[in-house]
């Protein structure tokens, strides 16, 4: 993809259209006339809503995620699967959540992963079937998309956009987000 800050791990480039959907209601790369671009009204409204409600109640946020997921091709799904598989913190957290939800607290996390999480990733990768594990990863990865502060709430500069892309198109550390005690 041209015209943006290169991301360190090419798999993460799959998230650039998603970020654009959030910011501009379009997956295409912004034009940046006069070195800035208007943020969508929907983004501004969702940002205000997010200040008072948990992210999972933000209909705009969830709608964008679903819109993004349905339009993915095989290569894009493979990139997302690779991103998830490389994130040990997320996988460990999901194994613990699965163990708690299913009351198998003495379960081996490798077995839980192999029997419950990996099949979901394979199904997503092969047929595009998205599920709780895929959706939760995206929710957690992009949960702070509305926390970015821009010098003007209605526009984003090219530099701000590049910084946002750099931050969101990188591995997220989930070890603190899954600090569960059993």
Image (cartoon, helix red, strand yellow):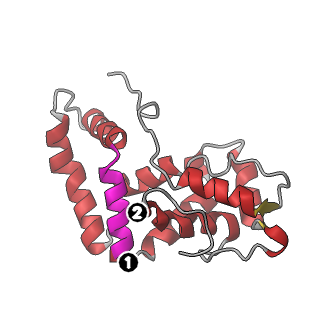
Question: Which sits in the foreground, 143 or 56?
Answer: 143
Q: Residue at x 41, y 27 (%)?
A: 179
Task: Give whichever of discs 1 and 2 has the lower sequence position.
Answer: 2
Question: Which sits in the foreground, 59 or 176?
Answer: 176
Q: Is residue 131 visible?
A: no
- So how many labels did they put on this image? 2
In the figure, residue 173 lies in which quadrant?
top left
Question: Which sits in the foreground, 1 or 76?
Answer: 1
Examine the rendered structure and indicate whether residue 95 appears above or below residue 32.
above
Q: Is residue 122 visible?
A: yes
Viewer-nearest of discs 1 and 2? 2
In the image, taking residue 11 as reference, residue 129 lies left or right, namely left
Tell me if residue 167 is in the magenta stretch: no
Do labels 1 and 2 touch, CB within 8 Å?
Answer: no
- The quarter of the picture where the C terminus appears is top left
The stretch in magenta equals 75-87
Give percent across and percent down for residue 175: 41, 33
Give percent across and percent down for residue 11: 40, 63
Q: Residue at x 54, y 59 (%)?
A: 62
Decide whether the magenta segment is chiefly helix, strand or loop: helix
Circle on res. 45: none
Residue labelled with disc 1? 73
Crowding at dot 2, Cα within 10 Å, few <14 / some 14-19 / many 20+, comes out as some
Q: Residue at x 68, y 45 (%)?
A: 147
Residue labelled with disc 2? 11
Give percent across and percent down for residue 8: 47, 56
């Amino acid at each position: 993809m041209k015209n943006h800050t290169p991301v360190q791990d090419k798999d993460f480039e799959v998230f650039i259209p998603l970020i654009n959907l959030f910011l501009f209601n379009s997956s295409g790369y912004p034009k940046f006339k006069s070195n800035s671009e208007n943020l969508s009204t929907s983004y501004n409204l969702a940002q205000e809503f997010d200040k008072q409600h948990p992210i999972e109640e933000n209909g705009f946020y969830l709608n964008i995620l679903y819109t993004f997921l349905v339009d993915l091709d095989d290569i894009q799904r493979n990139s997302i699967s690779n991103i998830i598989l490389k994130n040990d913190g997320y996988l460990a957290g999901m194994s613990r959540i699965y163990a708690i939800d299913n009351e198998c607290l003495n379960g081996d996390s490798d077995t839980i992963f192999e029997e419950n999480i990996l099949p979901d990733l394979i199904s997503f990768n092969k047929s595009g079937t998205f599920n709780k594990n895929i959706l939760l990863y995206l929710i957690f990865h992009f949960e702070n998309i509305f926390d970015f502060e821009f010098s003007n709430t209605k526009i984003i500069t090219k530099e701000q956009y590049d910084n946002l892309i750099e931050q969101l198109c990188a591995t997220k550390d989930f070890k603190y987000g899954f600090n569960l005690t059993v």
